[in-house]
Amino acid sequence: MAKKIEHLHWPDAPDMWMPYAPAIKVTGGTTIHCAGVTAAPVYHHHPHRPEEFDSMPDDMEGQVRAALENLKKGLGAAGATFDDVISCERFLTDINEQDALNKVWAEYFGDAKPATTTVQVVALATDPRCKIEINAIAVVD
């Protein structure tokens, strides 16, 4: 069965831009689970070596862009694109920077609006300079 993704909205939903859909219905396809990515290089040493993360951008917009580029590579490895993403979790160290996140998010996702959860956290595991981590679930044919 060919994959079909439906973005579902409430019957009485107002007509306004939102970076997500309240619900996603998927029929057919193969599910891809992408690990969380930050602005840090995906392939880095464990235990962590702080110098490996020195090239990360300092600002939220730059970090979102770098994280989404990392996600794009993971999706590509599975034969997926941002159009195939049905769900994302977004972890920010400062919820006040959510507007900067959504600005870049719109550039990458366009009309694709996965169901999302956005949460403020104290810190991210990769490096204390990381401001955002994103994981995703995608469905491909």
Image (cartoon, rainbow, N blue to C red):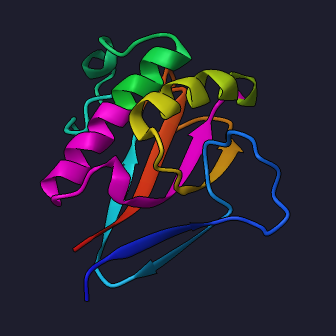
Horizontal and vertical percent for residue 20? 61, 50
**Is residue 47 at least partly visible in the picture?**
no
**Residue 124, image x and y in percent?**
53, 37
Residue 87, above or below 63: below
- Is residue 34 highlighted in magenta? no
In the picture shown, does residue 54 fall above or below 50?
A: above
Residue 94: quarter of image: top right
**Is 116 left, or right, of 108 in this rendering?**
right
Say whether residue 81 is left or right of residue 21.
left
Please say whether residue 89 is one of the residues in the magenta stretch. Answer: yes
Q: Is residue 12 above or below residue 109?
A: below
Residue placed at 36% from the left, 52% from the top? 83
The answer to whether residue 90 shows anywhere in this view is yes
Out of 113 and 13, give the one closest to the viewer: 13
Q: Is residue 108 left or right of residue 53?
A: right
**The C terminus - image quarter:** bottom left
Q: Residue at x 60, y 35 (%)?
A: 123
Residue 35, quarter of the rendered image: bottom left
Instruction: Name the image quarter holding the N terminus.
Output: bottom left
